[in-house]
């Protein structure tokens, strides 16, 4: 997979990799860094048309809206909430390549930390070998390789959600709320997860209200501090998001495969089913299977129905579902023949990106380049099927794992998982 991502698309003459898949020279970080730099050093509005125009020239060498535009649909602009400034502020006095290096290591560290955090949150106990295998798979997956190459802050948001969930399971609710508030720097990635946490808090307000107060206090502080920096930034941010969506033709993963009317109907149906399941689980403790399953459903549903979240780098949100699959692998493996068959099919779809990457790289070494021109994009396309596979495995888990069922004592390949009491608590 690493060889494929590093060499194959660039070595194919006559093919320009899709801008949605491959990095631009300045990476996704530049627009936010430049906007914050201009705001803090020169008191300019980062959402303004002048900043947007300068970003187009920086990325493309000319205005992409002009008569000779090559990329009219890929507009670069500052499209984050203004409080992302507090994250980027320490780097504005540096050269951009220095800031890139810092954020590369930061995002890599956050991604690495998210693996044990999700394992803890899902009550999955991994051996040292198991942690190493998980880290190897994570860092050789298309989502993480793409996210690190383009310096996507979505990796940071996924890490914040992992830390918030682990804090919730450990009983540190105020801290969990604070982390969820910071995760709103990419609201489209975090909105359904936050909605699940809000529903869960409502299930036992007296004991869980600290999570709400941590979230409310932190988000209020971020919004007020941002208002002091740039009065009226909220309306400017919303206008910038709408303009960005218009230029990028933001769509959901379902809309890629289905007509608009059908995709929205299906999205509404799936959302209502997941919401009903979450409503039934809202009173369960944070260390229970229903809590973990509801959160995994919310994150996988984010990739399927929320516009502009279909790019592969967002698939780091599927890590909790993968941890649940390992934890309850024995239930899936020892189910009925039809269940085992469905599990095999779903897991095969999930492994397609790695399998097709092997086929493409072997083809590069063994056959003519002309044949490779026809198949080099298979791993990229196969990665778009991964959220559907994960959603399918979560449905199967919901069928075979009940609140009363014991959790497995060992996962596949010797990965050890925690047990569960008769109440479903690990």
Image: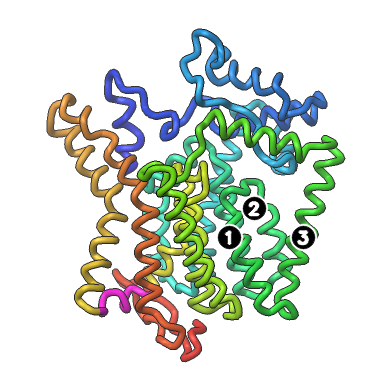
Q: Which residues are magenta?
A: 328-335
Instruction: Please tell me whether residue 56 is drawn above or below residue 105 in the rendered image.
Output: above
| Residue 32 in which image quadrant | top right
Q: Secondary structure at mark 1?
A: helix
SS at badge 2: helix
Q: Residue at x 44, y 40 (%)?
A: 146
Which mark, by number, is residue 311?
none
Which residue is depicted at the point 41% across and 53% down? 138
Question: Image quarter for residue 121?
Answer: bottom right
Q: Residue furthest left?
A: 367
User: Mark 3 or 1 closer to N-term?
Assistant: 1
Q: Give the crowd class for mark 3: few <14, some 14-19, many >=20 residues within 10 Å.
A: some
Give the numbered dot on residue 193: 1
| Residue carrying label 2 | 183
Q: Is residue 90 visible?
A: no
What crowding class fits label 1: few (fewer than 14 Cα within 10 Å), some (14-19), or many (20 or more)? Answer: many
């Amino acid at each position: 997979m690493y060889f494929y991502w590093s060499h194959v698309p660039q070595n194919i003459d006559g093919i320009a990799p899709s801008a949605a898949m491959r990095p631009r020279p300045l990476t996704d970080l530049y627009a936010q860094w430049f906007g914050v730099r201009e705001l803090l050093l020169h008191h300019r509005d980062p959402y303004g048309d002048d900043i947007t125009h300068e970003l187009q020239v920086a990325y493309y060498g000319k205005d992409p809206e002009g008569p000779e535009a090559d990329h009219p649909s890929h507009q670069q602009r500052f499209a984050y909430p203004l409080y992302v400034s507090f994250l980027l502020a320490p780097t504005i006095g540096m050269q951009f390549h220095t800031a890139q290096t810092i954020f590369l290591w930061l995002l890599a560290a956050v991604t690495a930390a998210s693996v044990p955090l999700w394992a803890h949150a899902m009550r999955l106990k991994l051996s040292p070998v198991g942690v190493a295998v998980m880290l190897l798979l994570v860092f050789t997956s298309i989502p993480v390789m793409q996210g690190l190459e383009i310096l996507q802050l979505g990796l940071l948001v996924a890490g914040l959600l992992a830390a918030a969930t682990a804090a919730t399971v450990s009983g540190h609710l105020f801290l969990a709320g604070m982390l969820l508030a910071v995760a709103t720097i990419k609201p489209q990635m975090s909105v359904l997860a936050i909605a699940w946490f809000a529903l869960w808090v409502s299930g036992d307000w007296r004991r869980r209200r600290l999570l709400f107060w941590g979230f409310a206090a932190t988000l209020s502080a971020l919004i007020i501090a941002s208002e002091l920096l740039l009065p009226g930034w909220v309306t400017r941010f919303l206008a910038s998001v709408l303009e960005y969506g218009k230029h990028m033709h933001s769509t959901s993963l379902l809309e890629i495969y289905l007509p608009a009317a059908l995709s929205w109907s299906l999205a509404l149906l799936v959302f209502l089913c997941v919401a009903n399941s979450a409503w039934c689980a809202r009173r369960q403790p944070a260390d229970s299977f229903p809590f973990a399953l509801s959160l995994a459903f919310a994150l996988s549903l984010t990739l399927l129905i929320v516009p502009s979240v279909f790019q592969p780098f967002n698939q780091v949100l599927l890590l909790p579902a993968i941890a649940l699959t390992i934890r309850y692998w024995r239930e899936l493996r020892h189910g009925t023949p039809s269940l085992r068959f469905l599990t095999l099919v779903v897991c095969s779809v999930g492994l397609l990106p790695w399998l097709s990457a092997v086929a493409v790289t072997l083809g590069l070494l063994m056959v003519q380049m002309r044949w490779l021109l026809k198949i080099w994009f298979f791993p990229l396309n196969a990665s778009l099927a991964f959220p559907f596979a994960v959603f399918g495995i979560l449905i199967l888990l919901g069928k075979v794992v009940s609140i009363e069922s014991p959790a497995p004592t060992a996962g596949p390949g010797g990965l050890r998982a925690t047990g569960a009491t008769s109440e479903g608590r690990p």
